[in-house]
Amino acid sequence: MSQPAVVETKPAEAEARDGASWGRWVGRPGRSLTRRLIWLASAWILLALVLAGWGLTTQYQESALRRLGDELSMTIDDVLLATRVEPDGVRVEEIKDARTLRGLSGKYWMLAERAPGGGLNVLARSPSLSGETLAVPADVPGRLAGSLGVMITYNDDGILRPPSHQPLRIGASMKTLTGRAQPVIFVAGIDRSLIDEDAKQFATFTWIALLLLGLGLVAAVFIQVQIGLRPLFELRNEIADVRRGKAARIARSYPLEIQPLAEQVNRLLDHNQEVVERQRTHVGNLAHALKTPLSVMLAEAADPKGDRPGLAGIVQRQTEVMKGQVDHHLRRARAAARAAHGLGETTPVGEVVDELAVMLERVFQSKDVEIDWRAPDTLAFLGERQDLQEILGNLIENACKWCRRRVRISAGPNGLGSMVVVVEDDGPGLPEDQREGALKRGARMDEAAPGSGLGLSIVDDLTRAYGGRLTLAASDMGGLKAVLELPAASD
């Protein structure tokens, strides 16, 4: 027979390390989930509002400065159109702009040329300057010379004397004039105090509005988190009621994200109850198995007519029976514990069936039993090897005990994360009304046959411990068919 493939799984240690890393990234254990959600949301809201406030105020100020720049460009164009070149210099005709004619009105212009020493010679200026000069930084003439006709704008806060000190927005452009070899620098300035005040008011209003919006959003997040996590709080209270004994299980329905958790808790409660019942069953089985040997020993010891020389042999035989029953139930308890913990071990089905078939054919050699089995190479049981041997061993041994000559075993996946093992024989079979009783502990359909009547009960107990199922039916071979469903390892 071919051997099944080994199914590899991710080591539990690696998964634990991954979970620990993720836990450290999310936050320290023991911290409130509510506070964590509120703080994270608040931090994001604060960051978003700060960026929005900075963007809005910056954009508003830039837009206002662009409007001033357009007005400065128009002023320079007006001065350029009014400029005339004369033999002794340049002359600017009167510009029809009242603000440039009134002293310190807030709108100014000036013409200048580069001096040999590196400074500027003022050629003309607007009456509104009242003898003052618009400031031109030392690097501006050089930049203008490299890009004729392009206007450069900048701020200046200290060119005019108090009390008429005005913050200005200044634009400068170098242009060539017909009839003049040296280019002329046109400079225009405009009071920006109103723009600065408007920008300050806009910024104040924006930050206050964003602050109120932020407080409202944080309050909304707090309410949302409280309402959103309320099912978790209710689930916590229900679990506490179960722990205190006020309830047997979780009865309420929860949202889709939490309902699986509630169902898993209920399954855990059911599993714990099943474990308790299973242990009680083990104790009952052991008591049942020991009752007969003890009765025999007591009867022999109390019978005055009994054969005293043979008493030692009877005691020895019954003691061996009792010891075997104790060992048997201890193995069952260990197997049930392994199934309950779900260690994730995988066992190739083909190997176990092959070993059992070879062994039982030898055991029942006197009947010339023939065991025919089929199982895919990749089929693997999700559980302990000893448990699978216990389950299949009892089923196949039972089939060999009652068959006439042939036993047939077939195993395969059912496509639902589990596998199906069918054990059939050509024996007399079992009436339908007795099949359910055959799975009960101590049940024996034929008192003349050897055994304790616990084989099928053990199979049923272990199968249910793994979340599987055992059913009995009639076989087309004429005997009994046992259908076993067990968890299968994924490929």
Image (tube, rainbow, N blue to C red):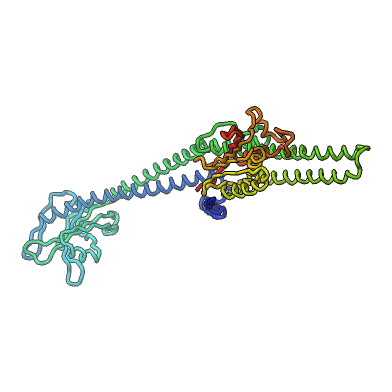
- Between 275 and 211, the one nearer to me in the picture: 275
Nearest the viewer among 451 and 172 is 451
Picture coordinates of residue 140, whole percent (x, y)? 22, 63
Q: Residue at x 57, y 44 (%)?
A: 372
What residue is drawn where x is 25% and y is 64%? 137
Q: Residue at x 24, y 66 (%)?
A: 139
> Which residue is at the front of the view, 39 or 240?
240
Task: Check the image and report above or below for 34 versus 434.
Answer: below
Q: Looking at the image, which residue sits at the far right?
A: 304
Q: Is residue 113 visible?
A: yes
**What residue is at 46 percent from the left and 45 percent from the top?**
42
Residue 299 in which image quadrant: top right
49 to the left or right of 273: left
- Expressed as whole percent of the image width and height from the top left, the position of residue 221 reads 47, 40
Quadrant of the rendered image containing residue 13: bottom right
How many numbered circles are shown?
0
- Residue 219, horizontal then vertical, whole percent: 48, 39
Outermost residue, bottom side: 117
Residue farthest to the top?
Answer: 433
Position of 272 with respect to 178 (left or right) is right
Residue 266 visible: no
- Give residue 53's position: percent from left, percent from top: 37, 47
- Give the quarter of the image for residue 215: top left
User: In the rendered view, does 168 fall on the left or right side of 464?
Assistant: left
